[in-house]
Amino acid sequence: MVAVQALIELGMSMGKLVVSLDGVVIKEVQITKDKTTLGRRPYNDIVIDNLAVSGEHAVLQMVGADVFIEDLNSTNGTYINGKAIKKQLLTHNDTVEIGKYKIKYMIDEGTDYERTLILKPGATAPTSHPAPAPSNFGGLGGPETAALIKVLNGAAAGREVSLTKVVTTVGKPGVQVASITRRPTGYVFAHVEGANRPSVNGNPLVGETVSLRNGDVIELAGTQMQFVQG
């Protein structure tokens, strides 16, 4: 069993796309959905009405705090910084090229974003407790009651981490990682990396995300954590 030994909170930021043609900015799109589609057809989230762009050209997928772009077997391909790609993780200032269009991926500084990583065994668990979460989330229309995760087993059993940020990522990097994302309608749990999928209440995660309810027990990398809200 891999015990939770320590948690580190790192400031993260929300990504956005800046679409330009011949150096002129056409639109800016904030990435807030799990999947953002891009193509010529009007039902896409980002519509580029140009014959060089396929009807369903590419899709951007947000996994935790990471954003991946995948080419959907488009006619003219998708390029990042001049190189053709099939699927790739986007980093700050990457330029996606589709036909004559350039789409720059940028990370907004100061966005309320967090990643929490569980370190390898052997580290010492912090003794200080996180500051109490506010009763609301800055008028975002989110859940009125703060939520937290409580470690149930291992050396850090009893440790509580308040879910006050947009995204909290938990797990053991390189083995199994998952994310808990705060949305206006509640909290959702998603698999990020690892050959084995995490489970909720003993049931392996089947879809991309699952909504969390008060008392749900999450298990990943041998660690059990309870989601508590209200």
Image (spheres, rainbow, N blue to C red):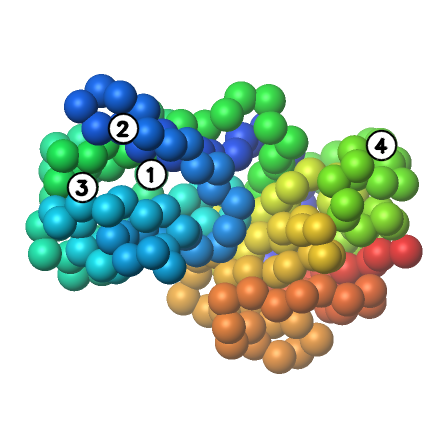
Q: Position of residue 43 (x, y in %)?
A: 37, 59
Spatial separation of the CA atoms under disc 3 and disc 1? 15 Å
Q: Position of residue 107 (x, y in %)?
A: 45, 28
Which tag is nearer the camera, tag 2 or tag 4?
2
Q: Amino acid at mark 2?
A: Ser
* Residue that badge 4 annotates: 131
From the viewer's perspective, is 75 left or right of 215? Answer: left
- Quadrant of the image for the C terminus? bottom right
Spatial separation of the CA atoms under disc 2 and disc 3? 11 Å
Q: Within 10 angstroms of label 1, few (less than 14), some, or many (20 or more) residues?
A: some
Q: Secondary structure at mark 3?
A: strand
Could you tell me if the residues under marks 2 and 3 are in contact, i.e. CB atoms within 8 Å? no
The single residue placed furthest to the bottom in the displayed view is 203
First-in-chain label (3 vs 1): 1
Q: Amino acid at mark 3?
A: Ile
Q: Is residue 143 above or below residue 203?
A: above
Q: Position of residue 179 (x, y in %)?
A: 58, 53
* Residue that badge 2 annotates: 20
From the viewer's perspective, is 131 left or right of 107? Answer: right
Q: Nearer the viewer, residue 182 or 198?
A: 182
- Regarding residue 152, the answer to whether it shows in the image is no
First-in-chain label (1 vs 2): 2
